[in-house]
Amino acid sequence: MSMYFKNVSKIRYEGKDSDNPLAFKYYNAEEVVGGKTMKEHLRFAVAYWHTYQARGEDPFGKGTAQRPWDNITDPMELAKEKVRANFEFCEKLGVPFFCFHDRDIAPEGDTLKETNEKLDEIVSLIKELMKTSDVKLLWGTANAFGHPRYVHGASTSCNADVFAYAAAQVKKAMEITMELDGQNYVFWGGREGYETLLNTDMKLELDNCARFLHMAVEYAKEIGFKGQFLIEPKPKEPTKHQYDFDAATVIGFLRAYGLDKYFKMNIEANHATLAGHTFQHELNVSRINGMLGSIDANQGDLLLGWDTDQFPTNIYDTTLAMYEVLKGGGFTSGGLNFDAKVRRGSFEAEDLFYSHIAGMDAFAKGLKIAYKIIEDGKMDQFIADRYASYTTGIGLDIVNGKVGFKELEKYAMTHDQIKNASGRQEMLEAILNQYVVSG
Ligand code: XLS
Ligand code: NI
Ligand code: NI
């Protein structure tokens, strides 16, 4: 196997006192936390688009990235080199999964037919390399937003020809995801949204989006695709208003159109921030609705209003995220996909390793802290006590549906001297600090 990352050998766990930047300080793949290894809990994935496609370009300047495949000019040769590089990269990091958009792995041809042929050629190479590797596909998706044909959206485009083209593209993306044994298939509503209501029939666009998803569900049944369908909420960017705004909006939409039993959420930290929520909020909403499927693990910059896709290094966030994941019973088909890119200034290939190591360590630490919080039970006990009034007397009657307004009025007439208890927010924040610091 050719070597793309020659200066880096297999990344090992060296523990918290190691000063080797190319070693894990907290992520110890085989270490058992509550009956499962860290590898089984965290199910890390490398995002193909950020790792092999992104060049660090921004609106003010060209890409700065220096990559081992930079001298290859033939697009198909380049695509193949990246496939090989992906396997070497994931193996060196010990990351068990990767994720891709159809257009990340193969270039488009002049016609849809040609594009699909190119895709097939690359998929066969991936399949071939999978035979001798433990690296698997966490999820596949279709890039139905980048090409100019998607200027007005894909399934929500005003142009029925675009709807049809997107359907053909997603059909193919589902097929290759299945062929590569992908464990999930993601729908991120790239340009499904609007810029202005002055030119938009929102009702028709939403109905069409639901029609599209129903077609996907039907087709999955037809071909026997058993992977989990995921929807990734995002409130804005690229459009001013994205229909899949946040978890609550998406869940409401799925229920309204009878799609809820086929989908779960793929929650991205930075998208939560853009929606004006915390990462934990989005995970919690998904979890309590039984729809927490997978995570796009990154972080945003609270001072910036766009999707900066930074590597997750904030231990508070990773702790509270893993708290929600553990409370939800852990990942099944999902995992932690690093939908994150190195900064423009971090242009060397080695930075791809430093960034993933930083993210993996942050989540490993978060997992351990979250597990300890749950195991100790102090936080749970506080919440249970806070709602204790619903476990006896009138509260229990409310929960059991035994009383209505008339009975409650009668009760309130004789219980109007109400006593509340403190919410103790600062005390709880200090307890959380103790957990995070003592780790
Ligand atoms: C963009 C999204 C995208 C999805 C996959 O903001 O995060 O990368 O994860 O299409
Ligand atoms: Ni994402
Ligand atoms: Ni994103």
Image: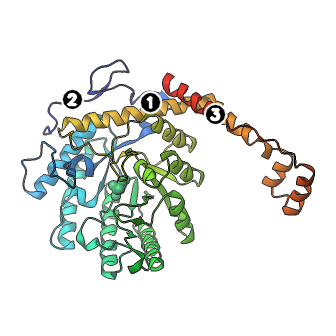
The residue under label 2 is 9
Snapshot quadrant of residue 142: bottom left
In percent of width and height, residue 279 lies at: 48, 46
How crowded is the residue under tag 1: few (<14 C-alpha within 10 Å), some, or many (20+)?
Answer: many
Gap between marks 1 and 2 measured at Cα: 23 Å
Q: Which residue sits at x=15%, y=39%? A: 4
Q: Which residue is mark 1?
A: 365
Q: Picture coordinates of residue 79 (x, y %)?
A: 16, 54
Q: Which mark is residue 379?
A: 3
Sequence order check, earlier mark of 1 and 3? 1
Question: Is the CB of mark 2 within 8 Å of ligand 1?
Answer: no
The spot of residue 197 in percent (x, y) is 42, 76
Question: Looking at the image, is mark 1 or mark 2 earlier in the sequence?
Answer: 2
Q: Can residue 37 be seen at all in this image of the molecule?
A: no
Disc 1 marks a residue whose amino acid type is Lys
Secondary structure under tag 1 reads helix
The 10 Å Cα crowd at callout 2, few under 14, some 14 to 19, many 20 or more, is few
